[in-house]
Image (tube, rainbow, N blue to C red):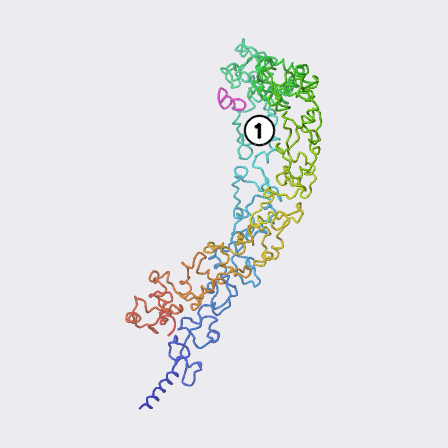
Amino acid sequence: MRKLLIIITFVTITLGLFGQSPHGDALKISCAECHNPDGWKMVEGTYSFTHNKTDFPLIGQHQSVSCKACHSDLVFSKAQTDCISCHTDVHEQTLGNECSRCHTPQTWLVENTSQLHALSRFPLLGAHAMADCFQCHESASLLRFDPHGIDCFDCHKNDYEQAKSPIHTLTDFDPERCMECHSISAFEWKGGNVAHFFFPLEGGHGSISCFDCHEQGKPYNSISPDCVSCHLTDYQATTSPNHQASGFSDECKDCHTTDPDWKPAQMGNHDAEFFPIYSGKHKGEWTNCVECHTNPSDYSSFSCIDCHEHSQSEMDNKHNGIGGYSYNNSACFECHPQGSSEGSFNHNASNFPLTGAHITTECSQCHSNGYIGTTTVCSDCHLSDFNQTINPNHIGMGLANTCETCHTTEPGWTPATLDNHNDFYQLNGAHTEIDCFSCHEGDYVETPNLCFGCHADNYNQTTNPPHIASQFSTECETCHTEIAWTPATFNHDADFFPIYSGSHAGEWTNCNECHTTPNNLTLFSCIDCHEHNQANTNSEHNGITGYVYNSNACFECHPNGEGEGFNHALSDFPLTGAHLTVECIGCHENGYSGTTTICSGCHTDNYNQTTNPNHQQNGIPNTCETCHTTVAGWTPATFAMHSTIYPLTGAHATIQNDCFNCHEGNYNNTPNSCIGCHTPDFNQATNPNHQQLGILTTCDDCHTTLPDWAPATFSIHNNYYTLAGAHISIQTQCFECHAGNYNNTPNTCFGCHQDDYNQTNNPDHQTAQFPTTCEDCHTQSAWEPSTFNHDNEYFPIYSGQHDGEWNTCAECHTNPNNYAIFSCIDCHEHNQSSMNSEHQGVPGYQWNSVACLNCHPDGNGDKGHLHNFSGSN
């Protein structure tokens, strides 16, 4: 029994092995549709299988292709139905993978290019429809169709730059607004629709050629919009009336419109600028200009007395008793500028009443150019008086030409005041009580502005004390005030020697006790004093180096008159360093009083002659103590103002006392730019290689002065790879992407995120054969949300019947490790009995997901594929 069981099991296994189809589980048709009992090889006429029953009917050139050309092995379902899986993309991803948008199974040739282009961003219109594709889409293979910019200038830059009539580059033509003049549907460049909004072409301008105004070969923007720029010859040649002789403005539009032949014309400003003819008494009393302007060649002349309403006898009678009346045209206008008899002119009622010298002045002296618009400003009539006045010289002194500030209308310009005298010389004290002549004596130009300039005689003639002999300063204000000569002050203690304080206070009565030469108060005597005698003084100064018994020596050691004598250590200049060994005469060769305590007072030559560094050229201040001590040899020295020339920060701060590190003994030619010292660092940098990347040598763009060049920023990162989305948040965390190697960092998403791609299992990107161009579905902000063109490439789930009918991918893709597998029959709306009933009578119907998709590729149940209506039996 056991032996029989083993035999049955073996036979069953063997039959199972022989019955397995090599074409895979997806092929559900009977073997007999292709094979016959004589062998597995398909023989023409013996099989009933037709490819047109599958979801890929053989159409066009596919009918003549060998099966093996598409089916590389016996599992036929492995063959893809999209064109790109079999056909090489000669367009190199510039047109997408949907070949059927342009090609048909019948031929690769595209015969409806214009219609296809109309669906793009740039429909082919006008000359573009006649252009060869390769004129715009240039490539080595002539088959790449990279997207181009759709602005005219993107393709026609050379046309714009080479345009000569007009020269576009020298004109304000915007290269981004070509269509303001040119039509995209035209077959030539002729600009027939120029929007001349900047100068509307109206009236006579509307019927002229461009070149009537614009000269060929020159920029169009050189044309002025002013009428006279084109019509100057018309203006100059006009004789009726003569525009130039009449002084007409060259603002043509004041009288003319743009209508042809300069008509109609109206001088609307005649009333305001000349004489009221459109208003007032003369309105409607004239027809033509020549009625008043009897000389048509000179409209500046006019006639009043020729009018039919006037006669001399009547006018003489009406003006009886009117001073200055004369029967002539100018006189009429002068008194009746508004053309009204009631409005004869009264100066006292005007804004310029006549006073002073103006009362006796002839009218013509002020109104030589007519009466209208005569100025009321003094300087407009008297500018020559102002300019020619020399005592005082008004221009030289910068006096304002507002004459009324100092003068009245009285003749001779006097009396006059000078309210702004203090702008030139302050009048204080006794000066406020005197008249002008006392100081100026009629000459306002050479008057001195110093006390001594006026009071030299007072100084020279003073004998108590004698100012000249005593060599007193001529700066009177040192001792005197402007109120009076006395009382006066003399700061003898501070300026010379303490006699009002200290040991000598109260020890003298008259100046000549010390100043024994009364005619020269610069001379003084110490040794003539009753308290001194040479023997006692010699004894007291025993052992004092440099002691000598004379008045100058006394003063040098006892400048304050005290017996203690001079102690340098207690002075305002203690001796230290090299000063300790210097002879007194080395500093006091001109005496002791007033010896400077400023380094540069003695050491200017050292400062000027120093060349390393050159103190003068470098603008180093001559305050020697800022850098030096009194130690001999000027060393050691510091340079506290280094930061004003080059700030020492970061790593530089650590070597600020090691000057040789940067200067190497030469302080004149030390560079002050980073690259000046760090060129070797720049050239030897390999991670990244600064030279190969073309990184600028302005080191401070990326680095600070901190040691080891870190941390560093890279503000020009977007020149190499644009940081957007989530990349922005790690822009300072370079290691995240570069891992310390800046030379071989990939610049594609997949280059960095391959692990993310490989490890993603929902959905499994590798199994689903998703492209590695991550940006097709994801943004740089985050992996989710993401987009996926499921409708066009696989099955409509965002539109049609299945829109809104699902929540997660796993509802249809029941195998999360393989998104190529899908399920239709597991949907909650379907069950097999209902579907069997609905497909009653449908040939080839099967209850499986692949069959569902084959018959309902768009997911629409009402439009399933029926073989009975497709031409197949």
Look at the image and tell me in which quarter the N terminus lies.
Answer: bottom left
For the residue pair 730 and 402, the one nearer the viewer reads as 730
Vertical relation: 870 (above or below) 150: below
Which residues are drawn in magenta?
Answer: 272-287
For the residue pair 339 and 22, the one nearer the viewer reads as 22
Q: Is residue 663 visible?
A: yes
Look at the image and tell me in which quarter the C terminus lies.
Answer: bottom left
Q: Position of residue 2 (x, y in %)?
A: 32, 90
In the image, residue 280 lies in the stretch drawn in magenta: yes
Q: Is residue 222 left or right of residue 28?
A: right
Q: Magenta-highlighted stretch: main secondary structure?
A: loop
Element carrying mark 1: loop
Q: Which residue is mark 1?
A: 249
Q: Position of residue 210 (x, y in %)?
A: 57, 42
Q: Is residue 542 left or right of residue 110?
A: right
User: Mark 1, residues whose alpha carbon is within 10 Å: few (<14), some, or many (≥20)?
Assistant: few
Quarter occupied by residue 487: top right
Vertical relation: 264 (above or below) 214: above
Quarter occupied by residue 502: top right
Q: Position of residue 727 (x, y in %)?
A: 47, 56
Outermost residue toward the top in this view: 321
